Image (cartoon, rainbow, N blue to C red):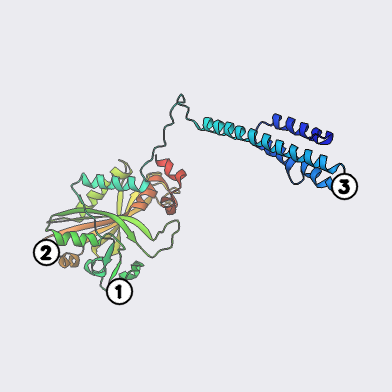
Amino acid sequence: MAHPRVDAILREARDAVAAAKSSADLEQVRVRFLGRQGVLTQLLRSLGGLAPEERPAVGAAANEAKRELEGLLEARLAGALEAERRAERARGRLDLTLPGRRPPRGALHPLTRVHDEIIAIFAGLGFSVVEGPEIETDYYNFEALNIPRDHPARDMQDTLYLSESTLLRTHTSPVQIRAMQAQRPPVRIIVPGKVYRRDVADMSHSPMFHQVEGLAVDRNITMGDLKGTLELFAREMFGRGSRIRFRPSFFPFTEPSAEVDVLCFVCRGDGCRLCKQGGWLEILGSGMVHPNVLKNVGYDPEEVTGWAFGMGIERIAMLKYGIDDLRLFFENDVRFLRQFA
């Protein structure tokens, strides 16, 4: 049943549906005409204000227009949604004519690089790589290394104990004991691995870090053999012009003991920021294996002698690459790691 006012609204609605280009446009048309404040909705709500004889004709025309508009919207909406889905699939389709993208290549972590370099240097000298448990007994970590329970040297290392007799190893030296117990001289080994201390992480400390221990035991081994070996190591690790020096020190498991410094490879001894104007950089501790340690593994110190050294892999890497914060090795910052690719 036609009505001039309803016909005008319906013509306007048809034109709006025809002009809509997307499902969003159609939704705006629906809200404009059929929403709670829509034109047709408001017309139906206002029927009570019309003359009684006019209400049936206007109401019937308005309801018929509403049904027609709902049908138009439903038909156009189905087509619009299908067109939008096709467009989305087309946008996501691979363009096989585009050139390929080379995936980013990973690289060895700087600690892994230094670890492998150290092993390669000593492997070239005939040393074998030996590993051992990270959870150790008090005996292997301390007592067998000439550090009894009442020894003041235990205060030098803040230990992470798991029980009264077990702990996270504080150095890789316990593996030396295990290796010597397992074989007779000659012994030539290096021992890389993780060690643990009760330290708070800062620029120069970490509760977990990496060490490499070296050990040589045989007849007639001297401090001169240790010095020659470490000089070769320094040249291979830091450059052909490297020099080292020994400074007297104390370690319970070696006697005599020495700290080893390398000539600063930036200023060549003149003094700079890296070496703190001293001209030398400390790289490791070393010494001749203490006779008590040899006795603890069943070796006769009258027949054999040996030397040992221990170095921190993080320390060597920081010096080699000019890194001033130990925490960078463990934060997995891709910007830092990418520099070693």
* Mark nearer the N terminus (2 vs 3): 3
Q: CA distance from mark 1 to mark 3?
A: 94 Å
Give SS at disc 1: loop
Q: Position of residue 189 (x, y in %)?
A: 20, 53
Q: In the rendered view of the protein, which quadrant contains the C terminus?
A: top left
Q: CA distance from mark 2 to mark 3?
A: 122 Å
Q: Is residue 5 visible?
A: yes
Which residue in the structure is indicated by mark 3?
Answer: 49
Which amino acid, by three-letter code, is at mark 1? Glu
* Mark nearer the N terminus (1 vs 3): 3
Which residue in the structure is indicated by mark 1?
Answer: 164
Which amino acid, by three-letter code, is at mark 2? Glu
Residue at image coords 77%, 44%:
41
Q: CA distance from mark 2 to mark 1?
A: 35 Å
Q: Based on the displayed image, in which of its 4 quarters is residue 25 positioned?
A: top right
Residue at image coords 31%, 70%:
154
Q: Residue furthest right?
A: 51
Residue at image coords 31%, 55%:
211
Which residue in the structure is indicated by mark 2?
Answer: 302
Give SS at disc 3: helix
Which amino acid, by three-letter code, is at mark 3? Gly
Q: Position of residue 53 (x, y in %)?
A: 87, 43
Badge 2, how many Cα within 10 Å: few under 14, some, many 20+?
Answer: few
Give SS at disc 2: loop
